[in-house]
Amino acid sequence: MAVISLDNPVVQSYIVYSAILALKLLFLSPLTGMTRMARGVFANPEDVQSFKKGKVKFDDPAVERIRRAHLNDLENIPAFWVLGALYLTTNPVASWATLLFRVYTAGRVLHTIVYAVKPLPQPSRAIAFFIPFVIMVYMGVQVVLYYITAL
Ligand SMILES: N[C@@H](CCC(=O)N[C@@H](CS)C(=O)NCC(=O)O)C(=O)O
């Protein structure tokens, strides 16, 4: 039986990397806001009125790029929180699970950098997306295999 306790280093590792990912996800909101301000492009007329500058515009390339990065995080990071937590219950080897959480987090941070902060040519974004994606699939399969025998 897996020991799910806050004293368990794998659980602590999951908590740390989950929090880093949440902070990274949150970071994209102020980045969007700052980019809107810098470029004078807003999503609502009341924003234009309140800042007394710029215009309503929905296709600014820089803002849309950050919004796509944000959406991509939302398509991926919540699945990590779920699958990572379930994976903990399968009694993984601590060093292996920690490595997976670490590489996942590094991949998602790199995805944000090469997509939204300092755009780089492909395949940099594809790699930064794909490695964390494979880790999630791996964890999900491990969870299913671990519990399916009990059904
Ligand atoms: N919703 C994604 C699904 C595929 C995906 O996540 N691809 C990665 C690697 S190419 C990506 O960064 N897509 C860009 C995006 O989601 O805006 C899309 O429309 O591209």
Image (cartoon, rainbow, N blue to C red):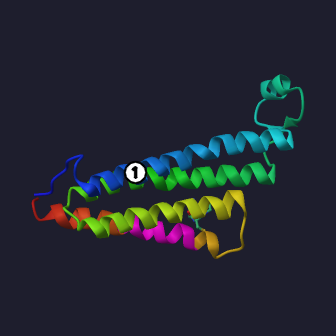
Q: Quarter holding the C terminus?
A: bottom left
Residue at the spot 26% in from the left edge and 67% down from the top edge: 142
Residue at the spot 78% in from the left edge and 28% down from the top edge: 47
Could you say where residue 54 lies in the image, as x and y percent from the top left?
Answer: 89, 35
User: Is 129 within the magenta?
Assistant: yes
Q: Is residue 130 left or right of residue 71?
A: left
Q: Is residue 36 left or right of residue 75?
A: right
Q: Is residue 103 left or right of residue 145?
A: right
Observer-nearest of 22 and 73? 22
Residue at the spot 49% in from the left edge and 46% down from the top edge: 22
Observer-nearest of 19 and 90? 19
Could you say where residue 89 lies in the image, as x and y percent from the top left?
Answer: 21, 56
Q: Quadrant of the rendered structure where residue 122 is?
A: bottom right
Residue at the spot 37% in from the left edge and 68% down from the top edge: 99
Could you say where residue 117 lies in the image, as x and y percent from the top left?
Answer: 70, 57
Looking at the image, how many numbered discs can be counted on the residues?
Answer: 1
Taking the view exactly as shown, the residue that stands out farthest to the bottom is: 123
Q: Quarter holding the N terminus?
A: bottom left
Q: Mark 1 is on which residue type?
A: Val
Bounds of the magenta segment = 127-137
**Residue, disc 1:** 16
Report crowding for label 1: few under 14, some 14 to 19, many 20 or more residues within 10 A (C-alpha). some
Mark 1: which secondary structure?
helix
User: Is 23 within the magenta?
Assistant: no
Could you say where residue 97 lies in the image, as x and y percent from the top left?
Answer: 31, 65
Image quadrant of ligand 1? bottom right
Observer-nearest of 112 and 98? 98
Q: Quadrant of the rendered structure where residue 140 is?
A: bottom left
Taking the view exactly as shown, the residue that stands out farthest to the right is: 53
| Predominant SS of the magenta segment | helix
